[in-house]
Image: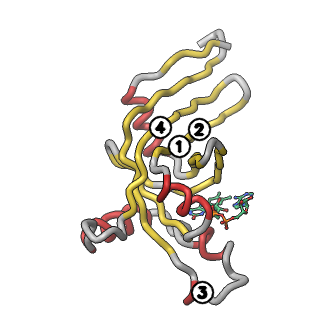
Amino acid sequence: MRIVATSQHECSDLLKRVSIGRLACSLDNQPYVVPVRFSYEPDRIYIFSTVGKKIKWMRQNPKVCLQADDIGNSSNWMSVIVTGTYLELSEPQYHTAQREHARALLAQDSQWWRIPLSERRDGLVSSIETVFFRIDIESMSGLRAMPETE
Ligand SMILES: Cc1cc2nc3c(=O)[nH]c(=O)nc-3n(C[C@H](O)[C@H](O)[C@H](O)COP(=O)(O)OP(=O)(O)OC[C@H]3O[C@@H](n4cnc5c(N)ncnc54)[C@H](O)[C@@H]3O)c2cc1C
């Protein structure tokens, strides 16, 4: 098996192709990682979220990291790591058009809203606080593994 660094173009292709990633944030030297569904467009990642620990942490420390991958098997996979800054679209300066843009991108996947809401089904749906946020991408790196014969 060979492992090679991929181009920025290949990183973008993977982020367009897959919709589940692991979002990492941190507070007071403590990392926290959760799986999330996302939509990518150049330089940005959009996520719809319930308000809980990750949102509270990212509001305090907006530096985040997201990892996504496409795993065929142990010798055929690709992984991308993005670093960037959390930006909540409910802030006054981000108006309806920005949120509608995020909603339209995320709605391309019909499941986009179900996981965050169903996780909170113990509470009244009307009482669940949700937010759209985006990650403004600062860097992307990718690694690809392939069998020696390719
Ligand atoms: C495939 C997949 C896609 C998902 N997509 C989204 C999405 O798009 N948006 C979204 O908001 N959520 C999504 N979730 C759920 C998400 O991973 C979190 O569980 C959820 O958002 C709550 O996170 P929180 O930080 O608000 O946790 P809180 O509800 O504040 O959680 C408190 C504690 O619960 C534990 N906990 C929370 N989440 C998890 C977890 N996933 N695994 C183990 N322990 C946990 C932690 O110990 C945490 O300290 C997805 C989950 C999966 C599996």
Task: Say which amino acid is labelled 2.
Answer: Asp
Which residue is tagged 2? Answer: 69
Which is more N-terminal, label 3 or label 2?
2
Q: In this view, does 39 lie above or below 119?
A: above
Looking at the picture, which amino acid does disc 3 mark? Val
Gap between marks 1 and 2 measured at Cα:
10 Å
- Residue 119, x across and y down, in percent: 68, 72
- Marks 1 and 4, Cα distance to the nearest angstrom? 5 Å
Q: Position of residue 84 (x, y in %)?
A: 42, 42
Question: Which residue position holds label 3?
Answer: 125
Residue 66: image tag: 1
The tally of labels here is: 4
Marks 1 and 2 in Cβ contact (< 8 Å): no
The residue beneath circle 4 is 82
Q: What element carries label 1?
A: strand
Q: Could you tell whether 147 is left or right of 81 in the image?
A: right
Is the Cβ of the residue at disc 1 closer than 8 Å to that at disc 4?
A: yes
Q: Quadrant of ligand 1?
A: bottom right
**At 37% from the left edge and 30% from the top edge, which residue is drawn?**
9
